[in-house]
Amino acid sequence: MITPGQLWREWGGWLIAALLAVLLYRLSGMLAPFVLSLILAYLLNPLVERMEAWGIARPLGCVLGLVLVVGMVAGLLLLLLPLLQLQISALLSQLPEYWSRVQGMLSPLSKQLGRALPPEVFAKLQAGAQAQAAEALSYAGQVASGLAGKLLSGGLALLNVLSLLVITPVVAFYLLRDWPLLLTHVNRLLPSVQAPAIRQLMQEVDNTLAGFLRGQSSVCLALSLYYMVALSLGGLQSSLVVGLLTGVLAFMPYVGALSGGFFALSLAWMQSGDWHLPALMLAIFVVGQLLEGYVLTPKLVGGRVGLHPVWIIFALMAGGALAGFVGVLVAVPVAAVIGVTIRYLLARRQADNMAEAAAAQGVSHPLSQPVSRRPRRPIAP
């Protein structure tokens, strides 16, 4: 007969994980500062540990690390926000001119199509295209005005922004200060039988997350700087907007380069009216892709991450659909946990199959031999 204690040891972890998932989904609207604090503490913990090795007390190291990050973010915002605002305003004001220029470029094709088709068919196609274009422009204007209204008006939006700016550093400080103590408590809660396997899984998850989050963040920052500088030198009028968008979206493999390249080529074509500027933009993005694929990603991320690009894109889209911004924040960690767990279970299954095959053939297989258990070393808080 199965006792409640055995049932809890077998299914308690899965029950806690399910409850946490439901809680995350239900409270996703208020969890953004806390999730950002957890990610920030995780990313800064190696720096704080290195400061401890240099003789700096951990609370002071936490303060120095947070001041460094907050200062860098604030400096970038103060430097880039005015320039981004000017370029976005200039782009919005030039959209009618760009649209008329596109119509002028397409007029020869329209004339050729009018000569090739019957007049009544061409008139219907032309009326339908104009109606669709007007509807698309109207819908885009409504979406943009709605987003601007949500971002710039309302006490709730202001409260959310203030909570991100105020609560995130405070919570991140306490998490950083108590990080070793938290790990010790979690380690003591692990069941004694499954503890070695869980520690191995968590170590692989940590390696995967550290390699991806820290490395890919550095790649995004380097690509943002490269594209903003290169597009500005190339003469693109909205270079900062396109370059920053490309660098940020580079967190999703291939999405940043494809979307940024499309916007850069489209804006360059509408800006110049010939093929010289689009060709230069294409060359800049080809160099950027070579730089990302052969220099930045191998050096900063490496090949030990083990997260397939398709899996990352699916995780980010699924997280955003399920829990919005918070879902996007936790998508990569959850994907790393799932991916590492699946690889671990497949490796264990393959090892069991090899051991069974060796036992069936009467051959002593190393995996079939009893493994001596070493006493677990206590973890200092």
Image (cartoon, rainbow, N blue to C red):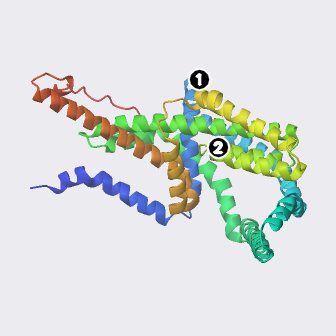
Mark carried by residue 250: 2
Mark carried by residue 54: 1
Name the foreground residue: 230 vs 333: 230
**Residue at horizontal 27%, vertical 43%?**
191
Q: Mark 2: few, some, or many residues within 10 Å (few <14, many ≥20)? A: many
Quadrant placement of the C terminus: top left
Whether residue 59 can be seen here: no
Name the foreground residue: 351 vs 16: 351
Whether residue 331 can be seen here: yes
Q: Position of residue 249 (x, y in %)?
A: 65, 47
Q: In this view, does 78 lie above or below 46?
A: below
Q: Mark 1: few, some, or many residues within 10 Å (few <14, many ≥20)? A: few
Q: Position of residue 339 (x, y in %)?
A: 41, 43
Q: In which quarter of the image is residue 104?
A: bottom right
Determine whether the residue tagged by mark 1 lies in a helix, strand or loop: loop
* Dot placed on the residue nearer the N-terminal end, 1 or 2: 1
**Amino acid at the residue labelled 2:** Ala
Q: Is residue 137 left or right of residue 33?
A: right
**Amino acid at the residue labelled 1:** Trp
Name the foreground residue: 298 vs 265: 265
- Tell me how far mark 1 sits from mark 2, CA to CA: 35 Å
Q: In this view, does 241 lie above or below 101?
A: above
**Residue at horizontal 84%, vertical 48%?**
268
Q: In which quarter of the image is residue 146?
A: bottom right
Determine whether the residue tagged by mark 2 lies in a helix, strand or loop: loop
Q: How many marks?
A: 2
Mark carried by residue 224: none
